[in-house]
Image (cartoon, grey):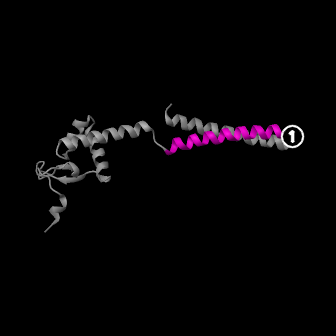
């Protein structure tokens, strides 16, 4: 079951069982002879409400495992590709090698830059090259250079 539907059903059930708990407690107060039965039912409904609320909160807090796994696989593909290309990739090479769109490749590479896995360098022609330092050997990929070198007077 999709996590969004699971969350909504859990929240609906939690509200429903919470209302039932409240009704049982009120019944116990109004009809004194049914006090024990209504308290037991209130505990049952209250426990169910707490359980459903816990499921809902866990569903909201954690994204689906499949999404995380797919992202890990894409990152692993990009790293394998970077290793085979001497640690330097363009978004187009990444898209072709990882079987994703250029936009997805660009976003994935940018995330890897933010995470510190890669750096961005600019070639002489102005193209963005993503450099994975742990895979770079002594050779150059085109004429990519560290953009900070260009700032030196």
What is the x, y in percent for residue 10?
Answer: 59, 37
Q: Residue 14 occupies which quadrant of the picture?
A: top right
What is the x, y in percent for residue 99?
Answer: 26, 34
Mark 1 packing: few (<14 Cα in 10 Å), some, or many (20+)?
few
What is the x, y in percent for residue 90?
Answer: 20, 45
User: Is residue 54 visible in the rendered structure shown here?
Assistant: yes
Residue 116 highlighted magenta (yes or no): no
Q: Residue at point 78% right, 43% down?
A: 25
Q: Residue at point 54% right, 35% down?
A: 6
Residue marked by disc 1: 31
Q: Quadrant of the C terminus?
A: bottom left
What is the x, y in percent for residue 145?
Answer: 15, 55
Q: Nearer the viewer, residue 10 or 88?
A: 88
Residue 78, placed above or below residue 143: above
As drawn, the residue found furthest toward the bottom would be 153
Q: Secondary structure at mark 1?
A: loop
As drawn, the residue found furthest toward the right would be 33
Residue 50 highlighted magenta (yes or no): yes
Secondary structure mostly seen in the magenta stretch: helix
Residues shaded magenta: 35-61
């Amino acid at each position: 079951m999709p996590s969004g539907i699971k969350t909504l059903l859990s929240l609906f059930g939690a509200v429903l069982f919470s209302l039932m708990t409240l009704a049982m407690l009120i019944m116990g107060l109004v009809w004194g002879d049914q006090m024990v039965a209504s308290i037991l039912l209130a505990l049952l409904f209250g426990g169910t409400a707490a359980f459903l609320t816990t499921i809902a909160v866990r569903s909201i807090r954690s994204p689906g495992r499949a999404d995380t796994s797919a992202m890990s696989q894409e990152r692993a593909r990009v790293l394998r590709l970077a290793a085979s290309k001497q640690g330097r990739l363009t978004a187009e090479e990444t898209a072709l090698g990882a079987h994703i769109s250029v936009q997805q490749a660009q976003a994935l590479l940018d995330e890897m830059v933010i995470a510190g896995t890669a750096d961005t360098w600019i070639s002489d022609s102005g193209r963005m090259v993503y450099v994975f330092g742990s895979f770079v050997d002594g050779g150059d990929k085109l004429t990519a250079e560290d953009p900070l070198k260009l700032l030196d007077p």
